Image (spheres, helix red, strand yellow):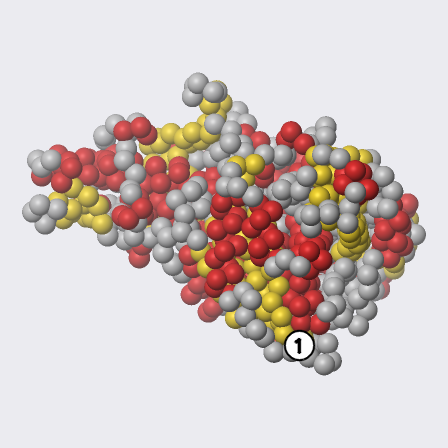
Amino acid sequence: MNIPTFDKKDLKNVSSQIFKASRRDFLKIGGMLAGSFALGVSFFSCNEKGEKISSLAPNVYLQITSKGEVIIIAHRSEMGQGIRTSLPLIVADELGADWHKVRIVQAEGDEKKYGSQNTDGSFSVRMFYKPMREAGAVAKLLLIQAAVKLWQVPIEECDTAKNQVVHKASGKAIDFGELIESAKNSPIPRIQDIKLKERQQFTLIGKATPIIDLHEIVSGTAVFGIDAVVDNMKIAVIKRCPVLGGKVKSYDDKKALAVPGVLKVIPIKGGDIPPTIEKPLSGVAVIAANTWAAIKGRDLLDVTWDLGEHATYNSAQQLEELSKEVLKKGTLRRNRGNFDQAKAQAKKVIEHTYIAPYLAHGTIEPPNALAVVKDGKCEVWAPTQHPQGARDAIAQFLGISAEDVKVNVTLLGGGFGRKSKPDFIVEAALLAKESGFPIKVQWTREDDLHHDFFHALSVQRITATIDQNNQISGWNHHIAYPSISATFDASVLQPADGELGQGASDFPYNVPAVRVETHDAKAHLRIGWLRSVRNIPQVFAIATMLDELAEARGIDPVQQALSLLGDDRSITFDEEMVNGKYGNYGEDISTYPWETARMKKVIERVAKEAGWGKKLPAGSGLGFAAHKSFLTYVACIVEVKVGPDNKINIPHVHYAVDCGTAVNTDRIKSQFEGGAQFSTSIALKSEITVENGAVVQNNFDAYQIVRMPESPQQIHVHIVDSEAKPTGVGEPPVPPFTPALCNAIYAATGKRIYRLPIDLKEQRSY
């Protein structure tokens, strides 16, 4: 049966059904235990009448053994965000399982069993929350029905708790394992006939639960991609062309082959334009018995490159060109009112350009993958966010069926979007086939920084007007950066609607005249998505400009934000989009509306918790910013202390977050704590530059990430209680932090920030 690939565009009118899983369903995850009882959750889309029109998968499996063990399949990739804990936790809560008796099994990459397993976009909990609850509730009902049949008691007198069905009136209790024979022979109840728990009945959802991998991670026994080993495995490192689109012209491998331990030298075809996300770069691989020999052999390779069309590219020059370009008239993408009139009648006009550099993902575990190719089949172990994408890419490049590719998903030592691109996994598969050895491709930190899918540099110019009544009357936002779409189509020169819908075209404030314009910007590197994507530069520009406007108006920034949001209402943007559509992060805006009341609530909460307006000593300041991204409402206040040497210290960060129903508060807090650290690096440290087509930075000495002494000292995360649908928390901490920090620096020093990373000695107005 052909099952279409599950994609975010298919989310409208998605329903699920529960089915009994067979032994055959479990063959690829290690076998179904004898005598066990298993359920699967199948997803499908419906038309407006609720009629099933197509199967979407994925199927998520729940198994209960005769010993009472509850086994739940985790079909999403774990990279520290806790999804391998949070999704099973939802099932366990509805089931009434004893969390200490729940075992989590990582699913392999298989779209026919699980649909899309692409773990990107702060997406997993909001997609699977309700179906996971339903799976647990169906299993619970079947077990209760089996107990009722045994005890001959009314069903309403029974419940589940701690892996048992209990009869509340008599105190009788029976373990799940003793009921599975009866339960597995009962018909599956209809979804509409099950009753989900009320919020007050939750024992796990909404509480703080440590991740299931915690002990293994802190004890060093957890298996990340870099830890995967098979018999006779060889190591490959690759010398890749330093310039996008460049190719190997010739090479001399004599010195490399003379290094003890070096076994083979193999060229890799690549360097195509557009690069896409699955194609390897052109290069020469050194296969060796160990990593050290492979690296030393690579150092001795003599390669002559055809550098191609991007060999003269300079990032500083492109920033200068784009800074001039945004002064011109651009392509109109959103329009409300008459900005030209607002500007002509303004009492005051404020205009600035905001510049942000290229960023690399810089995951602490660099890309790596282990591949075995034998008898026309391929098996891979990889820290991948997108196992189906890897599976399909391997099949394409090896010329085999996807059925003959198995992708084992390991823990990821950081992802941030980099490890959803399978180019490094394809490298391992190609070299395993060519060499005849099991091959682990290991990227060094230098490889990682030189050949990333970079977060694009950005130039934005905002012109804002204040009218005679001291109100903000106009907002004109000019935007220029290479689009992610150019990675797939080199002719693309302007941002996609989805990129603009991350802070720019969804500007929510009540300003009478709003105009958003975009400009051409050619891609000279592989451009990809990084944690919170285009929200980073767009919200940096928007929220720092709003702070400057508040000062010009003599109004408190928090009060200005509350006032500009206006009455409590749901807002849409499509009517003001020009030849485009607001994407709303893949969700129907009628299902996940933009609600001003929820945004105002997080703003009020963070102001209260942070003591907004309190008096601070000289050299210290508070800064505020608020933003909705990935359907989650976040307000942030940062406190800074700036020393006489311009050293920036961050004593406190306060977040208020409304992510709908909070599933695991431990992970929500950890994601926001990590988001603040991640954002501190972006704001203060990180910058990729390019000269003659090649990345300049080689390692963390030049491409810096925040160290412990520079990190925020205390990060306070205030979760707003909500009964709304759950939304994402992996990416929303990032966008408001940087502008809040910039605004705090201004409060402390009087210096406005218009360029990232922040350098107080070099800051100037643009």
**In the image as oriented, which residue stretches furthest toward the front?**
469
Label 1 sits on a secondary structure element that is: loop
Residue 336 visible? The answer is: yes
What is the x, y in percent for residue 457? Answer: 77, 52
What is the x, y in percent for residue 458? Answer: 77, 51
What is the x, y in percent for residue 609? Answer: 47, 64
Report the front residue among 275 and 595.
595
Horizontal relation, residue 594 to residue 529: left or right: left
Report the front residue among 560 and 161.
560
Q: Quadrant of residue 666?
A: bottom left
Give the residue number, with chain letter if any, for mark 1: 619
The residue that appears at 19% across and 43% down in the rendered structure is 159
The residue that appears at 67% across and 72% down in the rendered structure is 748
Horizontal relation, residue 369 to residue 597: left or right: right
Amino acid type indicated by mark 1: Gly
Horizontal relation, residue 414 to residue 23: left or right: right
Give the total number of marks visible in the rendering.
Answer: 1
In the displayed structure, 681 sits above or below 75; it is: below
